[in-house]
Amino acid sequence: MMRWDREDTELVQRERLQGASAAEREVTEEDREGRHAVHPCHPFFSVLRDHAAGLIVAGTIGIASEHLAASAAVALSPLLYATAIGIAVGNVIRIFDPQMNIYSPLASGLAFAKRRLLRAGIILYGAKLTFAKILDIGWAGLFIDLYVVSTTLFFGFALGRMLGLTESLTALISTGSAFCGCSAVAATQPIINGESHEVAAAVGVVVLCGTAAMFLYPFLFTAVPSLTADPRLMGIYTGSTVHELAGVVAAGNSMGGGVASTAVVTKLLRIFMLEPWIFALYYFGIGQDKDAVLVAGSGKAGKGVPWFAFGFLAVAAFNSLWGIPGWLQKVLMSLSAGFLSSAMAALGLETDLVKVRSLGSKPLVLGLALWVYLLGAGFVVSACLVRIFPA
């Protein structure tokens, strides 16, 4: 872990040196050597000093987003608030400091949050799942999730390429729509190395559609007779097509306990399917530009094995076989939420709204098209599968 921390610090320092004059580089190198000499036997202190400022800023925004999400009248993901606050703060600073010189002391800490905290948050997210819960869903829930995930990804990539979007932005929006909204976007970003403004655009699109779904599905439950008469169908339909887990919980509870329990389990299976997709993104170079794929496949520089995905599966397996105590599960989920919120805050701080605007309306078109597809095809296929595989 310490090696990774030093790599993050050295990467940021190399970026700072680029474009500097020879004299400036000499001063910077001397300063760096002097600072490292302060604690020759304690690299931990050097790492802590370099990362502290950025982590404090990202962590503060993350904590604020958690409190804001808990107190808001509408159930939205804290990752949305963390990204939005980070974007707002970062772009206000850009008005007065276009070169973002104020970020220099924060750079190492923000890089650590985007990389290490993000991966740690995803690993701990596995504490929410057990294989037993997934098996309880039945064949109808399993097949509808497989259908929704596979066809949404296929449709998303096909339409994204038709619209001329970058592979990374297409992957972020398609993955967020197919699996679990902001969390899926966050899990995908370190694999495909999506730009900060692309992540912001993807988060905005999936949150917009997911928020609309929270209000639309309870209306459909009362307005469509076939849904009103079958809470199991409504639960499977909700869990397999609503973007965010928080949205599934909010919409499900408003439609009754029977709908909510089925919807949440269906959604958990859909979340679990994200892990095989993460491996596919990495090993097949999906959603990455050709140069990145060639580098990853050459064995010279690559990004390494996506250990955080294995970590997620290990935590879920442990919870399934031995069970994580309720109190510890709450602690782990709180840490996961805090880490993910801090990571998204760091991404938000580095997001330039000018670059987001330069993407135009195409990301929104893709996101809305996928949402309409989920609403229509998800309902038809859910209804057919519930008839084929009754409870």
Image (cartoon, helix red, strand yellow):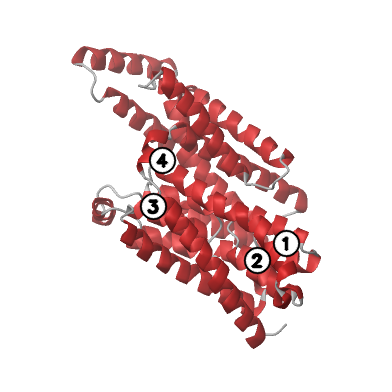
Looking at the figure, which quarter contains the C terminus?
A: bottom right
Residue ID for mark 2 = 238
Mark 1 and mark 4: Cα distance apart in space: 32 Å
Q: Left of 58 or right of it: where is 383?
A: right
Residue ID for mark 4 = 197
Label whose residue precedes the other's in the sequence (1 or 4): 4
Q: Indicate the secondary structure of the residue bearing disc 3.
A: helix
Q: Indicate the secondary structure of the residue bearing disc 1.
A: helix
Label whose residue precedes the other's in the sequence (3 or 2): 2
> Label 2 sits on what residue type?
Thr
Q: Position of residue 246 (x, y in %)?
A: 66, 53
> Label 3 sits on what residue type?
Lys
Label whose residue precedes the other's in the sequence (3 or 1): 1
Label whose residue precedes the other's in the sequence (2 or 4): 4
Mark 3 and mark 1: Cα distance apart in space: 31 Å
Question: Pointers 3 and 1 in contact (CB under 8 A)?
Answer: no
Label 3 CA crowd tier, 10 Å (few <14, some 14–19, many 20+): few
Residue ID for mark 3 = 362
